[in-house]
Image (spheres, grey):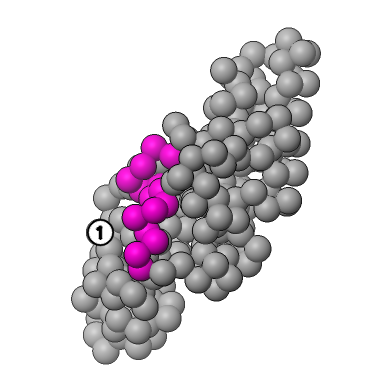
Amino acid sequence: MRKINKLTPLPHFNGRNYKVDCEVWSCKRCTDITFHSKYPDIYQETRWQILVDEQNQQCGYTELYIEKLEESHIDHYKKREDFSDLTFDWDNLIVATNDINFGAKYKDNIYKIQPHEYGLIFNPVIDHVENDFYYNEFGMIREDEGRVKKTVEVFNLNDEYLKARRKKIIDMIDSFKNGGLSTLDIKNIIEKDGFKSVVEQYCL
């Protein structure tokens, strides 16, 4: 996980045009015919802008590279069920992988985060998480501090699959370094492997 620098919302992003309980923000329920014809799928546009322009096509929690838009969804960092006033708060929207074993869906459906727990974990929109996460040579996040440990637990960031993916990148970086490649060349080669914070740590 790393800091996400949020940008200006899409010009026509406006929660007042949708019902709070709208599942996909696709305007299908919107009663404003003019708006409906002008913006047929604001959800897709919103997801694409956040994923590409703000998150470098990486999941906002796991840093997995997301190749196809349909492999992701817009997550409400603070759940709509508990914080309905933040449903259309741009800073509460993070694009995440659809995997159930870690990330956003794990947070909400398996861990089942409670409202009081948000103060115990990192918020990637606010916190420079990469300054607190340390990845060992096996791709594991060291969990020896309070907020780090809790964040890893809530999002299951030390899942075996994630550790294996991170280890593969670390091994690739070591191999490229031993082969004499420059840091810039290495970053360019593995750009679409995701895990930017791991790359930054091991390319120093």
Lateral position of residue 108 relative to residue 171, left or right: left
Measuring 39% from the left and 37% from the top, which residue is drawn there? 128
Lateral position of residue 181 relative to residue 31, left or right: right
Q: How many marks?
A: 1
Residue 94 location, x and y as percent?
A: 42, 57
Decide if residue 59 is in sight here.
no
Task: Bin the neighbour count of mark 1 within 10 Å (Cα to Cα): few under 14, some 14-19, many 20 and up.
Answer: few
For this orientation, the residue located farthest to the top is 180
Measuring 46% from the left and 35% from the top, which residue is drawn there? 132
Residue 135 location, x and y as percent?
A: 61, 34
- The front one of 159 and 19 is 159
Task: Determine if the magenta segment contains residue 161.
Answer: no
Residue 80 location, x and y as percent?
A: 36, 74
Decide if residue 83 is in sight here.
yes
Quadrant into which the C terminus falls: top right
**Mark 1: which amino acid?**
Pro
Task: Determine if the magenta segment contains residue 118.
Answer: yes
- The front one of 11 and 196 is 196
Lateral position of residue 176 relative to residue 188, left or right: right
Q: Secondary structure at mark 1?
A: loop
- The front one of 141 and 89 is 141
Q: Which residues are magenta?
A: 115-129
Residue with the mark numbered 1: 11
**Quadrant hosting residue 186:** top right
